[in-house]
Amino acid sequence: MAPIVSVENLTHAFGKGALRKSVLMNVELALYPGEVVILEGPSGSGKTTLLTLIGALRSVQQGSLKILGQELHGARKQQLMKTRNQIGFIFQAHNLLACLTSQENVSTSLKLHKHIPKREYRPRSEEILKAVGLGDHIDAYPKNLSGGQKQRVAIARALVSRPKLLLADEPTSSLDSKTGRNVVEIMQRLARDEGCAVLLVTHDNRILDIADRILHMEDGRIGS
Ligand code: ADP
Ligand code: MG
């Protein structure tokens, strides 16, 4: 089975000259369809940097990074954008658009997929919002939602297009334990049913058991 993500010898640094700081050192990682992998490790160890590289949100400096068959090292902007559109992202901050309802926020990610007809936006968005327990808040604006509800809208937005790769950075940190559990179980189901690979950064030891593998990151290196 071909990996969805293949990272080889990936090295990354921030800053220049005397201020240059190595953040990732020779990282190796492969993610396969249908697996849920948790990445944990101390703050500052490079987890978010790795996730944003895999998500085509920053340029590769050194090493190889293949996402859904596409090499990102040296890839053009257009290609990075294309890869990015095929990935579901969930960040710590939910980044919802304040002027859009839950349903409209979720629909924004369907608009990136030209083959999905407009008339499907609402039913698809409603279905996934119900699945994350927001059936009563489909037309609500973010200002009328709690922190946990906003995070669930963000999760619905990442899942609605059924991506082959889901990247989540501390997605349960603002959720109570029951909601957090629900949310990761939805991700797990997506992985099982759709052959999606899920990479989940978390400190939340209440959800470690949903992982097929747990990777430990320290000082820019992955051990296990
Ligand atoms: P983690 O997610 O594991 O907490 P990060 O990947 O956010 O770690 O950060 C790793 C290191 O890189 C930290 O020392 C952080 O200060 C530094 N860093 C992260 N982003 C930047 C940036 N944009 N510019 C400079 N340094 C950064
Ligand atoms: Mg981080």
Image: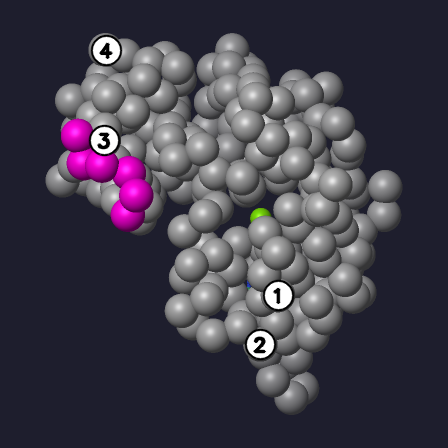
Residue highlighted by disc 1: 71
- Counting residues from the start of the chain, the first of labels 4 and 1 encountered is 1
Q: Which quarter of the picture shows residue 63?
A: bottom right
Residue highlighted by disc 4: 136
Residue highlighted by disc 3: 121
Q: Is residue 178 one of those drawn in magenta?
A: no
Q: Is residue 144 visible?
A: no
Q: Could you tell me how far apart the alpha carbons at marks 3 and 2 are, in whole angstroms? A: 34 Å
Q: Could you tell me how far apart the alpha carbons at marks 4 and 2 are, in whole angstroms? A: 45 Å
Question: Which-is-in-front pick, marks 4 and 3?
Answer: 3
Which of the image's four quarters has the N terminus? top right
Q: Residue at x 41, y 61 (%)?
A: 81
**Residue 93 percent location from the top left of the image:** 41, 41
**Residue 55 percent location from the top left of the image:** 53, 54
Q: Amino acid at mark 2?
A: Gly
- Counting residues from the start of the chain, the first of labels 3 and 1 encountered is 1
Q: Could you tell me how far apart the alpha carbons at marks 4 and 1 are, in whole angstroms? A: 42 Å
Q: Residues within 10 Å of mark 3 (few under 14, many from 20)?
A: many
Residue highlighted by disc 2: 74
Q: Amino acid at mark 4?
A: Asp
Quick one: SS at disc 3? Answer: helix
Q: Which quarter of the picture shows residue 107?
A: top left
Q: Residue at x 32, y 17 (%)?
A: 127
Q: Could you tell me how far apart the alpha carbons at marks 4 and 3 are, in whole angstroms? A: 18 Å
What sort of colour scheme is used for the picture? one colour
Quick one: SS at disc 2? Answer: loop
Q: Amino acid at mark 3?
A: Tyr
Q: Which residues are magenta?
A: 114-119
Quarter, ligand 1:
bottom right
- Cβ(mark 1) to ligand 1 < 8 Å? no
Q: Is residue 216 visible?
A: yes
Q: Is residue 172 above or below residue 51?
A: above
